[in-house]
Image (spheres, rainbow, N blue to C red):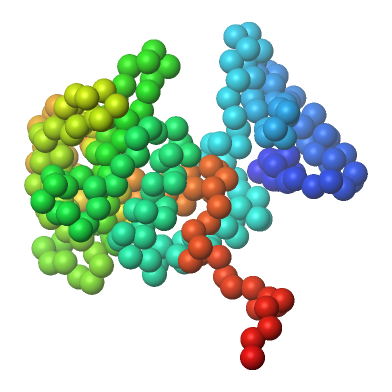
Amino acid sequence: MNLLRVLMHRSDAEDDDLDRAQALSLINQPLSREGFEAFYGDDNQLYVRHIGTKTVSSLTANPHRPFTPAETKRRDQLNAYLDTCSEDDLINQVLLPLFRQLGYHRVTSAGHRDKALEYGKDVWMRFVLPTQHVLYFGLQAKKGKLDSSGVTHGSNANVAEIYNQVLMMLRHEIFDAETSKKVLVDHAFIVAGGEITKAARNWLGGKLDASKRSQILFMDRDDILNLYVVSTLPLPAGAVPANPFSDDITF
């Protein structure tokens, strides 16, 4: 873990460059035994290459890797923002930029003002596979914790409340203006700004048949935070603390 922190620490100081080069040499010793090697690309990002097939993947894009101190600070700031933001802010300020950064196309918010045309979807989007096949995704977002308790408390949402919304999302067609076709959603994201409990996942899995169960994808707060940090997105305006040493002079 310490080696990775040194490798991913960016600095112009010569000592840091030497430490990073030494750490890169040390981490390549066990990687080479597995047929891999780590290296830096032209964009100063850390990559891992399979020696035999020359397949390259970015290590810095892994949301499960250890974070640098600067990334941990950004994660904590975003975590505090998710405690106070509204559901619309969660969608528009966090989720929409995140999915665009992750490579999804036509990321479109249905909006909460026009409930009649939402049909269970807060967001719909599409993803183009390397084979050029297109998959369509719908997304239902809740601000707080998603659980299976019988009563909704505060911002906590009951999974039964979104059960019908998920069914509506999977059954209702969306119109893709670029292809001028109506298509069904291939997968449905259930996103929570808090925790999605294991009981809630099991309850929903038990209610859906096998075919629909495979279409459901869960994303909770930890997933959002980790993906947001490794995607190097700027934090929402509300997540950045005001500068107490501003040059602006007020009278």
Residue drawn at (42%, 49%), measured in percent from left and top?
224
* Residue 205 in the image, given as x and y percentages of width and height: 16, 40
Residue shown at 33%/65% (left/top)? 86
Position of residue 52 in the picture relative to residue 141 (left or right): right
Kindly give the residue lying farthest to the bottom in the view shown.
251
How many labels, in total?
0
- In this orientation, does residue 189 appear? no
Image coordinates for residue 4, horizontal then vertical, percent: 68, 40
**Side of 148 relative to 2 (left or right):** left
Q: Is residue 187 above or below residue 222?
A: above
Q: Residue furthest right?
A: 14
Nearer to us in this view, 30 or 20: 20
Residue 55: which quarter of the image?
top right
Instruction: Name the outermost residue toward the top.
Output: 52
Is 147 left or right of 160, judged from the image as shown? Answer: right
- From what the image shows, is residue 55 above or below residue 44? above
Q: Nearer the viewer, residue 122 or 117?
A: 117
119 left or right, relative to 222: left
Residue 79, image x, y percentages: 46, 61
Q: Quadrant of the C terminus?
A: bottom right
Name the residue: 38% across, 20% down: 129
Considering the image in quadrants, where does the N terminus appear?
top right
- The residue drawn where x is 35% and y is 39% is 107
> Residue 13 at what x, y percent from top left?
87, 48
In the rendered image of this protein, does residue 101 appear above or below residue 49? below
Looking at the image, can residue 191 be seen?
A: yes
